[in-house]
């Protein structure tokens, strides 16, 4: 059975798990009511199933190549992109004034999730444009907005982000690309960027690069960086792509996976660019794009997890090995306890990661529609969890999916291995998951843990509401929230940041586990005792939630034991 986009799952989450109703009661998003949302999910699912999913293997088997300086994309990708552009999917949540649909990010997140499951390599292209659209909407001049936004929204032009350099990866502030004022409102951008996703293609009229570079009077580090829009073809007086700019794709990387997405070394050789935002304010402007992309990348992880799960389930329900240990079973490997365990883990964690991504999206929409500071803080707090837990889930679920296939999982034709290879980079790009976790315990806890305590209170309240119906599950969830509160108090009381960083990854994981228990409990409350979602909730709360305790033991260890293990010890 081919990939089936899980539109119904989003309907359930929007109705029962996250307060999407609050979004549609705002003036800004009143038009995205249940009927409209429903129709959009149905239509998007159709595009995923019929247009994108059939391209998934093409990208893997016939990667994009560089031919005489031109990037040739995988078979079918040009038509696939055209369908996305014509359907208006590139700029679902972009402003209507500039050709977007003005829809909530909650809906575009659901669509991005489904599209990532269908064909991650192609979906990465519009994701980059979406980030660029948001950055330009917030920081570009009116003239630039009028010129670029409608073209990006329609998909006639595509967007990229150029941060990384050979010596400036996680440490973006170490970059050495330079920009000089041409004295005519433009800048000459020089430098080499590496790992640039979708740096070029053979299906859009133009490619617009957002490039981080330093002006001559820019201070060292992140404070002195500016952001420039550098188009491949310089728009002429009528706004059409004109003269070729002084930039080129030097080479394409040979990657573990995601072969359909060209990843380039880019050279800017006095290329003409336009300043976006303030001089030396590039990081602020780029952060708009990066935050958008962090939610988007977390969502990519969840989408791939869904596809890997569907494939594994189908295989498990077909493959027969050994005698079924259960009366009246299916007679397939899905009857074996360990296979059942793997499938249940996959399904349970997809629901958790998806609920978290949707909660982030709802907070972003409420923040935009109401300007409420609490929603802004909530979205910011949830973003690193969405990115790191979403992509870790993508990877662990894809690996479990491969395992369910046994030896056939290791054979490429099955397609299970492609998910493992494709999704792996989502844990690395857009800030590695280690960097996300550090952001979580440092910047996102500059409020002394206030947002964390607020969310934990909500979980305890949910547990209280569930206590009469599901006393055991509710008790476990309540205790987990309470322990998480103590661990958060410990975390924010660490004055030496390295003590926080040493446990940041397990701390973020523990937080996600506890958030997930609330999502599952809510689902059980909605569905009642004799329901598949309630049985899944019980599985999660009994078997997976307790993992938070081990994670917290590590999270609260501080840095000293890590450094007690010396570099010499590691090399001994
Ligand atoms: C397929 C692909 C597509 C990409 N697309 C783009 C793109 O479109 N645009 C773009 O600009 N970039 C892109 N990137 C680059 C990507 O964002 C970087 O690879 C990533 O940010 C990590 O940087 P790095 O590779 O230099 O690793 P490094 O920064 O060298 O990190 C190596 C390891 O050290 C850890 N580390 C580094 N610093 C710290 C620290 N301070 N504290 C703790 N741990 C630390 C990291 O977590 C990691 O585990 C892409 C990369 C790939 C592979």
Image (cartoon, helix red, strand yellow):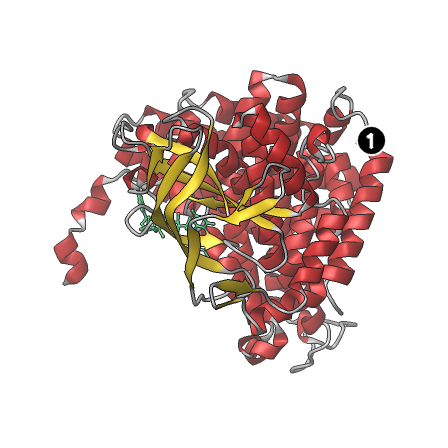
Q: Residues within 10 Å of mark 1 (few under 14, many from 20)?
A: some
**Residue in view at x 59 percent, y 24 percent:** 142
91 relative position to 448: left or right: right
Instruction: Give the x, y percent position of residue 440.
Output: 43, 34
User: x and y percent of residue 222 in the render?
Assistant: 32, 32
- Residue underneath mark 1: 33
Give how far across and how far down residue 200 sits, in percent. Answer: 52, 56
Quadrant of residue 412 within the rendered picture: bottom right
Q: Nearer the viewer, residue 241 or 55?
A: 241
Residue at (72, 35) in percent of width and height: 99
Nearer to us in this view, 62 or 60: 62
Q: Nearer the viewer, residue 426 or 497?
A: 426
In the image, residue 127 lies at what x, y percent? 59, 46
Q: Circle 1 — which element?
A: loop
Residue 470 is drawn in which quadrant? Answer: top right
Q: Is residue 217 visible?
A: yes
Q: How many marks?
A: 1
Q: Is residue 176 left or right of residue 10?
A: left
- Residue 405 vertical position relative to residue 532 in the rendered view, above or below: below
Taking 520 as reference, is 566 left or right? left
Can the viewer see residue 346 in this picture?
A: no
Which residue is pictured at 25% across the width and 40% down the height?
Answer: 559
Q: In terms of depth relative to the viewer, which is nearer, 233 or 184? A: 184
């Amino acid at each position: 059975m081919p990939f089936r986009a899980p539109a119904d799952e989003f309907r359930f989450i929007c109705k029962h798990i996250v307060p999407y109703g609050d979004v549609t009661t705002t003036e800004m998003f009143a038009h995205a009511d249940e009927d409209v949302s429903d129709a959009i999910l149905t239509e998007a699912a159709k595009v995923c199933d019929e247009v994108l999913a059939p391209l998934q293997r093409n990208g893997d088997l016939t990667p994009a190549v560089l031919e005489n300086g031109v990037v040739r994309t995988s078979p079918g990708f040009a038509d696939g992109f055209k369908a996305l552009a014509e359907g208006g999917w590139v700029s679902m949540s972009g402003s209507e004034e500039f050709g977007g649909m003005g829809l909530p990010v909650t809906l575009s997140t659901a669509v991005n999730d489904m599209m990532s499951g269908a064909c991650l390599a192609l979906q990465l292209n519009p994701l980059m444009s979406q980030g660029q659209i948001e950055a330009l909407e917030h920081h570009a001049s009116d003239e630039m907005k009028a010129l670029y936004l409608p073209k990006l929204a329609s998909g006639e032009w595509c967007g990229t982000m150029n941060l990384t350099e050979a010596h400036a990866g996680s440490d973006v502030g170490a970059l050495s690309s330079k920009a000089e004022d041409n004295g005519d409102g433009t800048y000459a951008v020089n430098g080499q960027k590496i790992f640039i996703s979708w740096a070029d293609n053979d299906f859009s009229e133009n490619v617009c690069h957002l490039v981080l570079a330093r002006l001559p009077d820019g201070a060292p580090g992140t404070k002195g960086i500016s952001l420039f829009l550098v188009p491949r073809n310089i728009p002429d007086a009528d706004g059409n792509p004109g003269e070729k700019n002084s930039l080129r794709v030097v080479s394409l990387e040979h990657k573990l996976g995601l072969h359909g997405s060209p990843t380039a070394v880019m050279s800017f050789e006095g290329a003409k660019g336009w300043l976006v935002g303030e001089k030396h304010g590039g990081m602020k402007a780029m952060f708009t794009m990066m935050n958008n992309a962090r939610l988007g990348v977390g969502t990519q992880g969840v989408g791939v997890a869904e596809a890997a799960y569907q494939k594994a389930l189908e295989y498990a329900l077909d493959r027969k090995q050994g005698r079924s240990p259960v009366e009246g079973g299916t007679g397939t490997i899905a009857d074996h306890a360990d296979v059942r365990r793997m499938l249940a883990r996959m399904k349970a964690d997809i629901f958790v990661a998806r609920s978290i991504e949707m909660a982030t999206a709802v907070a972003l929409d409420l923040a935009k529609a109401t300007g409420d500071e609490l929603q802004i803080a909530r979205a910011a707090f949830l973003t690193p969890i969405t990115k790191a837990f979403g992509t870790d889930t993508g990877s662990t679920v894809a690996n479990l999916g491969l395992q369910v296939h046994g030896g056939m999982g290791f054979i490429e034709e099955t397609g299970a291995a492609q998910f493992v290879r494709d999704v792996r980079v989502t844990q690395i790009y857009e800030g590695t998951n280690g960097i996300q976790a550090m952001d979580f315990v440092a910047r996102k806890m500059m409020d002394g843990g206030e947002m964390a305590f607020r969310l934990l209170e909500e979980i305890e309240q949910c547990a209280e509401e569930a206590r009469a119906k599901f006393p055991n599950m509710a008790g476990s969830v309540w205790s987990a929230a309470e322990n998480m509160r103590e661990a958060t108090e410990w975390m924010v009381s660490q004055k030496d940041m390295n003590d926080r960083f040493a446990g940041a990854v397990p701390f973020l994981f523990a937080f996600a586990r506890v958030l997930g228990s609330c999502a599952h409990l809510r689902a059980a409350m909605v569905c009642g005792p004799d329901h598949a979602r309630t049985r899944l909730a019980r599985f999660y709360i009994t078997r997976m939630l307790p993992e938070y305790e081990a994670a917290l033991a590590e999270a609260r260890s501080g840095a000293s034991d890590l450094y007690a293990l010396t570099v010499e010890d590691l090399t001994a």
